[in-house]
Structures are given as C-alpha cells and as structure tokens.
Amino acid sequence: MISGIFHSTYEKDMALRKTHTQKIRIAIVIIFVLAFPFFANRYFLTLANQVGIAIIGAIGLNILVGYTGQISLGQGGFMAVGAYAAGILTARMGMPWWGSTIAACFITALIGTLFGIPSLRLKGLYLAIATLAAQEIILWVVTHWRALTGGVDALVVPDPMLFGLRMNTDFNFYWVTWGLVAVVTILTVNLFRTRFGRAFIAIRDQDIAASVMGVDLFKYKLLAFAISSFWVGLAGALTAHYRNIVTWERFTVDISVLYLAMIIIGGLGSVTGSYLGATFMTLLPAVLTNLGRAVKSVLPVIDSIIPFIQQATFGIVIILFLIFEPEGLNKMWKDLKDYFRLWPFSY
C-alpha cells in the first residue's frame, strides 16, 4: 500500500507541483483568475488590481524579511522611488509606460542596494531603524526636490497606451497586473531553488554559520535588498500608471507598516503567505467599509468612526495572529490541507 509521495525521476522531484491535487488546485486558480474580469463589476476589478499590486509588493518584502531575515520598514519609501521614477520618465521624458516601468524597477533596486549597505553591520531592531531612516530620507527628498518631483504637488502621469488602447482602465489593467503577478511568482519560487535563494535562507537561519560555510554575507545581503527592491519598485510603478497621479502621501510609513503586517499575517518566508496576507489586508478595509454602510441606517454615526474602526481592527488582527498563529495564514492553509489529506485519521 502506498503511504506517501514518492518520485522515481529527478524531473518529478524538482517539479513545482508534485501531486495531482496540487496541479488541480493551481488549475482551478488559473481558471478563476482568467474568468473573473468577465463577470466582475468595476468595483471588484478595482479591488482585484489593488490586491495584485499588493501581492507584488508583499513578495518583494518577503524576500528580504521572510527569506533573508533582514527587517525592513522602508517599503513605502522604495515604492515611492518606483512610482516617481516611472512617473517622471513617462511624463517628463516621454518614455513609454512599459519602458519606464522596467527602468523604475532597476532604479529602485539601485536605491535599495545603497540603503542595504548598513545590513552588514546592523541586524534586528537596529536594521529596522536604519530602513525606517531610509523611508524618511526618501520622502524628504521627494517633498523637497521640487525641480525633479514637484515637491508636495501631485505628479500627473499620462495614460498608459498599448496598440491604441488605454491600459489603465480597470479591465485592461487587470491583465497587466495579474500577468506580472504570475511572472513575479514564478521567478521568486524558482529563485529559492537556486544557490542564491539557499544562501538567503542560510543567512536568515544563522548568518555566522552561513559565513563559516563560505556564504559571502555582504554580497548576498545586498543582493537580497536589490531583488526585493526590484519587485517593490515594480509595485510602485504599477501604482503610478494605474492611478495616473503620484503623490508622496501614498507612500508614508503607514504603508511600510501595512506591508510588514501583510507578510506577518500571511506568513514569513512564503510566497503563498504573501498572496494570503496581501489579499487579507487589502480587502479588510473594504469589508469594514461595506459593513459600515450596511448598518448606517441603524447607526448613523458609523460613518464618522469607520476610519477608527479600521485602524483598531488592523492592530487587533496583528496582535491576534502574533499570539495565536505566529506563522500566519499560510500555516492555517497548510493545516487545512493536512486535515483533508489525512482524514479520517488524526495523525
């Protein structure tokens, strides 16, 4: 009797989806993603686009924090670099939106690498404070370098056009966003099947032991900052082209905390956790807002306190996950899969 999963070839052992159940699940997800825009209204398409951008940003942050163990509170600042780089290159230099998006990713990777230099000497809380300083430095530059960014005034970005179509409509941008989500996911999953990804994980688990085994800490920490910032810059660039307006208020330290909460709630060191956490934290405010509207007739005062309810719920959710499920939604998803895989046995 077969009592486990066994592979007779290297190809099967190295496959991303090793069982038929996993292949069926991913097929269902792909079919849902492809069919969703044809049935969803504009409101749900907007939410789907926001979730897609959040997933890309969360995967980028998870590479640095979850997989490499380098705590970062500069997510909002690095997203601002990507957004402003894409906006300036498109609006003022006439670069096509897809070209400015690629360029913004490399620019953000360069800036992220520069701010990652202190990671050789700093770790833990000290590194978190250093990246928080990066967040504040970037926003200060954005708001004071008027000749380049426009200062506190909004930067207007032209509509992204492709073959005569305006790509930042909710329907068209859905395909752009989720196509890039698929690319980012595949590249990130495969990254941790290479020596670079294994080096990141070794640094996270015990950097001194990794160094003794020959891992160049400085090189791989900077590489982690670069790759993480590359994806974060992509999220920022997509935000700029989708919204048509770039303003520093979209990239405050609150955004850095929000993305850190996404990967904590979703699950550190997990691409699936990035999906779950980004979806959960993006949809939570929308759900609370809709609930507030539903009870508005009974409690008219609800409109004025909804923002405070959202903030309180945000904090409570983080605390509850840290106490009761530190490994996040990804662990809950694994437990659910294990339950059905082992049922009716309890072991």
Image (cartoon, rainbow, N blue to C red):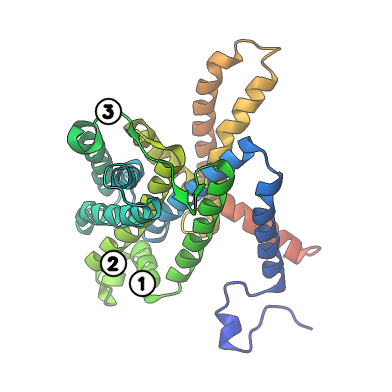
Give the quadrant of the C terminus. bottom right
Residue corresponding to mark 1 = 196
**Residue 40 as seen in the image, left or right of residue 154:** right
Pair 3/2: label in front: 3
Return the disc, 1 or 3, that comes first in the chain's sequence: 3
Q: Is residue 325 visible?
A: no
Q: Is residue 5 visible?
A: yes
Amino acid type of disc 2? Answer: Tyr
**Mark 1 crowd level (few <14, some 14–19, many ≥20, 10 Å Cα):** some
Amino acid type of disc 3? Answer: Val
Q: Which label is found at residue 220? A: 2
Amino acid type of disc 1? Answer: Phe
Q: Secondary structure at mark 2?
A: helix
Q: Secondary structure at mark 1?
A: helix
Quote the CA–CA distance across marks 2 and 1. Answer: 7 Å
* Mark 2 in CB contact with mark 1 (< 8 angstroms): yes
Residue 151 at x, y percent in the picture: 24, 31
**Mark 2 crowd level (few <14, some 14–19, many ≥20, 10 Å Cα):** some
Where 234 sits versus 297, above or below? Answer: below
Q: Residue at x 45, y 37 (%)?
A: 243
Front-lying residue, 174 or 326: 174
Residue 326 at x, y percent in the picture: 51, 48
Q: Residue at x 26, y 71 (%)?
A: 211
Pair 1/3: label in front: 3
Tell me the quarter of the picture where residue 304 sits.
top right
Give the quadrant of the N terminus. bottom right
Residue corresponding to mark 3 = 152
Where 168 sits versus 26, above or below? Answer: above
Quote the CA–CA distance across marks 3 and 2. Answer: 36 Å
